[in-house]
Image (cartoon, grey):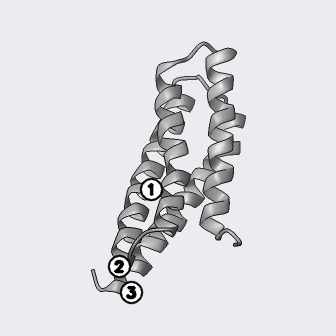
Amino acid sequence: MKRSVIQEKSYAFAIRIVKLYKLLTTDRKEFVLSKQCLRSGTAIGALVAEGVYGQSNADFLSKMNIALKEANETLYWVELLKDTGYISDVEFDSIHPDITELVKLLSSIVKTTRTKIGK
């Protein structure tokens, strides 16, 4: 079965977050913010995967809502890592569009699903 756009993008983003975590903990000795970013950044794809195979449209909507919350949290951590100097402007400019795109995609999915199921 072919994966959807949101599945592909959230999985690819999780890989980027894992690599960012490795960089931050190994090279920059940052362990607290990077762990938060790792948790929320990898949760997005896991929640999307759960939602796709959910038991109902309501279950799907619930998982997408939580994935959206995790995406917004990840955006916060990425911005904080940049503003505290743990990642450079170049690194931020590389990852920021990806998380912003995920937030927009998930927002759209949530709105469309709410309309579809009347919630």
The quarter of the displayed image where residue 67 is located: bottom left
Q: In terms of secondary structure, where does tag 1 sit? A: helix
Q: Amino acid at mark 2?
A: Arg
Relative to 77, say whether 60 is above or below. below
Q: Position of residue 56 (x, y in %)?
A: 38, 76
Picture layout, residue 47 above or below residue 79? below
| Quadrant of the drawing holding the C terminus | bottom left
Label 3, residues with CA under 10 Å away: few <14, some 14-19, many ≥20: few
Q: Nearer the viewer, residue 76 or 36?
A: 36
First along the sequence among labels 2 and 1: 1
State if disc 3 and disc 2 touch (CB < 8 Å). yes
Instruction: Identify which residue is drawn at 52% across, 24% down.
Output: 84
Residue at the image position 48 percent from the left and 73 percent from the top: 108
Check disc 2 and report its element: helix, strand or loop. Answer: helix
Q: Are marks 2 and 1 in contact (CB under 8 Å)?
A: no
Which secondary structure, mark 3?
helix
- 41 lies left or right of 61: right
Q: Relative to the observer, which residue lies in front, 10 or 28?
A: 10
Q: Residue at x 29, y 86 (%)?
A: 118
Q: Which residue is mark 3?
A: 116
| Crowd class of label 2 (few under 14; some 14 to 19; many from 20; radius 10 Å) | some
Give the percent coordinates (x, y) of residue 8: 67, 61
Q: Label 1 crowding class (10 Å Cα cut-off): few <14, some 14-19, many 20+?
A: many
Residue type at tag 3: Lys
- Res. 89 in view: no
Q: Which residue is mark 2?
A: 114
Give residue 93's quadrant in the image: top right
Q: Nearer the viewer, residue 23 or 53?
A: 53
User: Which residue is the site of mark 1?
Assistant: 67
